[in-house]
Image: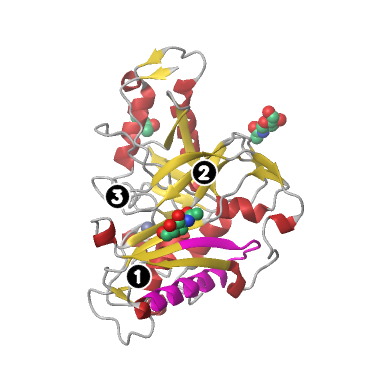
Amino acid sequence: MKLISLLPVITLIIIGFILDQTYASGIGTCYEHTTYPYKHETMKKTKCDMEKVRGQQQLSSVVGNLSPDQAFVIDFHCGVSDKTLCSKAQTAFNLVGKRIASVLKINVVIKVNATFTDFCVAFNECISGSAAPARTIPMVDSDNITRLYPQSLVKQRMLSNRPQLGTYDIVANFNSQANMFFRGDGKIKPGQFDFEYIVTHEFLHGLGFGSSWRTYFSNINILTPMPIDDGMTFVGFMETEFDRYMTVQQNGTSVPMTSLTKQLNSIFSSKNSGTVNFAGTPQFKLAQQLLTAASTPSTMNFVTNSKDKILLETSINPFQDGSSVSHVDSKTFTTNSDFLMMFAAKDGITLDDVAKMNGDPTGTGIGPKTLNALETLG
Ligand SMILES: *[C@@H]1O[C@H](CO)[C@@H](O)[C@H](O)[C@H]1NC(C)=O
Ligand SMILES: *[C@@H]1O[C@H](CO)[C@@H](O)[C@H](O)[C@H]1NC(C)=O
Ligand SMILES: *[C@@H]1O[C@H](CO)[C@@H](O)[C@H](O)[C@H]1NC(C)=O
Ligand SMILES: [Zn+2]
């Protein structure tokens, strides 16, 4: 089937993580992500055929419940000549790895390709930076729906038969020109951002905290999961694992977003052969309504395995790809221990101090609900 009047914009964020058993789909297509300083991530398809994994050694030389020191391996690339600055950034990356690993159980080493460079010069874009899963892999979930998982999670499953993995699990790029505070710099100043705060937040996106629901189509105001094409035409929408746990309020009831993805995907059923004008369908109307919901306060939640509801950021109007929906609600969490995954960081205060001020029981800045979400993802 062909779809007219829609051009997928191949830019997005991706993610996913869960506990229950999954089966590799054998779809053979994975997605490589880069976080260069475009507004959104870019991604490209890559072949990742199934492979047999003989013994756990092949997965990694270190396997087991890893200590915080072992869990993250950071390959650090510094693009600036100031060696002191490079060293501070490298130390911070390592500390963030330890911070996260001190509250998450990690079985297989997570490899990060971390770059610290002058974005303003290198890319003529002065944003602070970001991180993403280096590769996302389609896996069939227990509900028989194929969703995109970050490689870091697929790895933790230690499956004997799984799609090929890439070298890195997370790609992280940060701008050396941003006004950042590093541990040991003395006292943080107003206007400065704590580098460890920013990197911790971004690493959690890299581990799967983020939705694929976005506005992929230029000039068409609809919200959908990631559009998938077969190289020629557009064949459906695919969720990330995070999306599996999202709900939206519709007429006073809480509806799993997955059921709406199913409705959207029903236009691709075989009876719809030939060309369909998406704009004329009920599915199009639904996608329009969802964009409205995603820019209306208190409409979407992430529901954890333990039925803990985490209100997501839907107060930004107009909807903003990357900020809306993939973060926790700012109004709810500003003074709460789960502040870390709000879309905006606080300046003039370190992660440790916000954690203390907001009474985070873990002391890491990764609050109990955030941890619950990460555990739900896997
Ligand atoms: C890791 O990052 C460096 C520096 O940004 C880049 O040149 C290299 O291609 C990356 N490696 C992979 C495997 O992505
Ligand atoms: C998933 O698909 C398999 C095989 O087609 C089927 O046996 C199973 O009942 C399905 N499970 C669910 C939850 O739909
Ligand atoms: C909400 O209810 C109204 C009236 O019954 C209906 O027209 C509308 O489609 C419903 N909206 C959703 C999102 O289900
Ligand atoms: Zn974020």
Q: CA distance from mark 3 to mark 2?
A: 25 Å
Q: CA distance from mark 2 to mark 1?
A: 28 Å
Mark 2 or mark 1, which is nearer to you? 2
Residue 223 relative to residue 238: left or right: left
Mark earlier in primary sequence (3, 2): 3
Mark 1 or mark 3, which is nearer to you? 3
CB contact under 8 Å: marks 2 and 1 = no
Q: Is residue 102 above or below residue 132?
A: below
| Res 82 quadrant in image | bottom left
Q: Reply yes or no: does residue 301 show up in magenta.
A: no
Q: Where is residue 243? Give x, y as percent.
A: 48, 44
At a point 59% along the width and 49% down the height, the residue shown is 165
Mark 2: amino acid: Arg
Q: Where is residue 36? Give x, y as percent.
A: 35, 53
Q: Is mark 3 within 8 Å of ligand 4?
A: no
Q: Could you tell me which secondary element the residue under label 3 belongs to? A: loop
